[in-house]
Image (tube, rainbow, N blue to C red):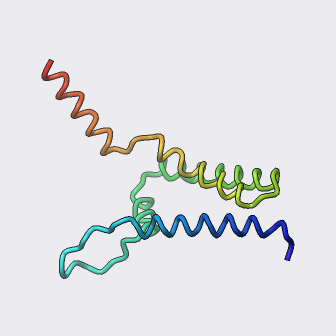
Amino acid sequence: MNLSLIPALGGAAAGIGIALMIAGLIRTPQRAPGAADRPTGPITKFVRNFRALDDQAKALRATTAVIAVAAGAGAWLLTQVPVIGLGITAVVLLLPQLLMPNAAIRRHTERQQALADWTR
């Protein structure tokens, strides 16, 4: 085994461990007795949400995924460190979701602004 692979495997193992720890800490909502037993994991939710999107949103997500994979592959080839490539891919995929508020937050903000305008 090549010695330069050990830090990369250690970093990948640490990243997977942290992700599993976070996934274990996230509470799942309690279901009512007799509720249908259908999977409610994060991957299932992602697939269900992706199917509900319109064509333009699907194309945007596909384009983002292609850019993320290309950026990750480029970083991996440039630095020769696979963990950096995986990290860049994750950042490119998750950054839009972190920076753009979702519809619920937008509605809440609009309600707060309407209330502020009404009280003035």
Q: Considering the image in quadrants, where does the N terminus appear?
A: bottom right
Up/down of 4 relative to 87, above or below: below
Which x, y percent locates residue 87?
65, 55
In this view, the residue in front, 66 or 108, is: 108
The reply, left or right, for residue 3 in relation to residue 55 is: right
Up/down of 43 relative to 85, above or below: below
Residue at the location (22% across, 32% down)? 112
- Tally of numbered tags: 0
In this view, the residue in front, 119 or 25, is: 25
In this view, the residue in front, 119 or 103, is: 119
Q: Considering the image in quadrants, where does the C terminus appear?
A: top left
Residue 109's image quarter?
top left
Up/down of 9 relative to 94, above or below: below
Residue 45's image quarter?
bottom left
Residue at the location (68% across, 64% down)? 11
Residue at the location (18% across, 80% down)? 33
Which x, y percent locates residue 82?
74, 61
The reply, left or right, for residue 94 in relation to residue 50 is: right
Up/down of 70 relative to 103, above or below: below
Which x, y percent locates residue 39?
37, 76
Residue at the location (27% across, 67% down)? 29
Which x, y percent locates residue 16?
58, 68
